[in-house]
Image (cartoon, rainbow, N blue to C red):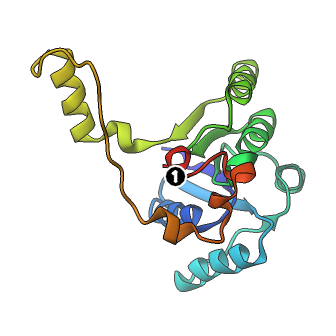
Amino acid sequence: MAKCTSIVVGTGGMARHHIRMMLDQAETTEVVGFVEVSDDSVKAVREIYKERELECPPFYQTIAELVEAQGAPDASFVCTPHKFHFENACDCMEAGMDVCMEKPMVLNADEAERLIESRDRTGRLFVVAFPGSLSPAVKKAKQMISDREIGEVTGIAAFAHQHWKQATTGKWRQVPEISGGGFLFDT
């Protein structure tokens, strides 16, 4: 099995979790570069590599700069603030990369339609990382509804709880122009 070469675009907290997982899959995945504008995030990623006694791949300010310096890898993982999802995903697909992107896909329907057009035109694979819908509990609930085991479903009430407000105070997730909304949009 050939290794997939990949870049990570945006290396904040969630991306660093994914980077650790990617490093644990070294037999199938090779991270060859990062796109990051925050010095603090760059330092944090370099620390992950240092802890593992690995050489850290280079950092670039833009996707175009990375592609110009080393060519396009097989794939990209976009983990930027939501406002930048559309542009980053399109830039990666236009450069010839498949894209996995943290949720949410984009900020609005217009961006979604344009992103799908970019995917169709470039023929690249595009996936939004939202594994919750693949959980055994969700699959079981879907099957129960489909089989009408619980009767006809006419409404659904849900509760999602996390310490979102406290954990995101002072961060981009609480700035609607960057995040696209608040807790419900983010979660």
Coordinates of residue 153 in the picture (x, y in percent): 22, 19
Coordinates of residue 169 in the picture (x, y in percent): 59, 70
Which residue does the numbered mark 1 point to in the structure image?
Answer: 183
Coordinates of residue 151 in the picture (x, y in percent): 12, 16
> In the image, is residue 125 above or below residue 62?
above
**Residue at disc 1, secondary structure:** helix
Residue at image x 24%, y 26%?
Answer: 142
Q: Is residue 154 left or right of residue 103?
A: left
Residue at image x 66%, y 37%?
Answer: 106
Answer few, some or many: residues within 10 Å of disc 1's Cα (few below 14, many 20 plus, some between 14 and 19). some
Q: Is residue 158 left or right of residue 3?
A: left
- Whether residue 71 is visible to the viewer of this picture, yes or no, is yes
Residue at the left extreme of this rendering: 149
Residue at image x 48%, y 62%?
Answer: 164
Coordinates of residue 45 in the picture (x, y in percent): 64, 74
Nearer the observer, 17 or 161:
161
The total of numbered circles placed on residues is 1
